[in-house]
Image: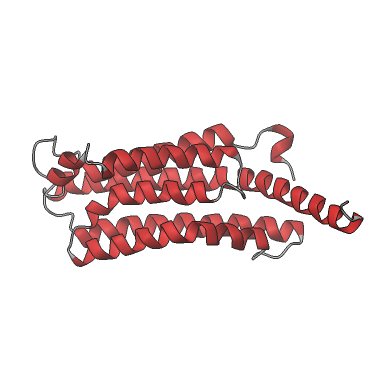
Amino acid sequence: MIARSEAEDHLRVIRSLMEKATIYRALSAPAALVGGILSLAASIFLMWYERHNGPNEITSNFFGAVWAAVFALTAGISLLLIWRDAQRRGEPFLSIGFRSAVMAMLPPMLFAALITLAHALRNTVHYSVPWWIALYGLALLAMGHFAPRSIAILGWAFLIAGAICVGGMLDFWIGSRFSFGADLPEFINGPCVLMGITFGLFHLAYAACTWPRGSAARP
């Protein structure tokens, strides 16, 4: 028979997980909106830059720097939202749930960083794009115990899209377009379009579907 104190601990853990899932939904929708807008803006900017400066002006380092800035801004805004909510609730910012979620995401994110570094050393950062998409999907799926079902759906969308790209079905497009000049219209390139569709449109769709409404949006 379960002791009363143990049962209370179990109930407290369940309640805490439910609250974290609700908070995560409320916080991730604004963060997804920001990330989606920034990703679309970066994709459009890179294609505009290529259009006005020539087919080979987007170097590997420039491509990587633009997307690193998008990642840093999105991550910073997400952390700010989580910090503000922790302050409002009178809870520590680095809570057990937060640390557990970060640890769950860490392996695929570190793998993505290593792949990016390897491609950066070869001046081929654009070839990291399929891996970014797939590994980001794995990172979202790894948070399944700390996030609502909508995060898992988003994770599967990224993972499937990334797997298609990594599998080579779009490799001819990406490979031909880092020269940013070949068989497609000159204002289009594969890596930017893929980033815009996934990190841009996927996040915007997620934000639209999960944005807090009515009483759910009030503290």
The image position of residue 165, as x and y in percent, is 27, 41
- Which residue is found at the position 37% from the left and 47% from the top? 134
The image position of residue 4, as x and y in percent, is 91, 55
- Which residue is found at the position 25% from the left and 48% from the top? 46
**Where, by quadrant of the figure, is residue 202 drawn?**
top left
In this view, the residue farthest toward the right is: 4
Colour logic: secondary structure
Quadrant of the drawing holding the C terminus: top right
Nearer to me, 5 or 45: 5
Answer with left or right where residue 171 lies relative to residue 152: left
- Which residue is found at the position 51% from the left and 51% from the top? 142
**Residue 196, relative to residue 17: is it above or below?**
above
In this view, the residue farthest toward the left is: 182
**Residue 33, relative to residue 121: is it above or below?**
above
Answer with left or right where residue 162 lies relative to residue 55: right
Nearer to me, 115 or 56: 115
Give the total number of marks visible in the rendering: 0
The image position of residue 8, as x and y in percent, is 86, 54
Nearer to me, 212 or 49: 212
- Which residue is found at the position 14% from the left and 50% from the top? 53
The image position of residue 215, as x and y in percent, is 74, 35
Answer with left or right where residue 4 lies relative to residue 179: right
Residue 205 can be seen in this image: yes
Residue 189 can be seen in this image: no
**Where, by quadrant of the figure, is residue 117 drawn?**
bottom left
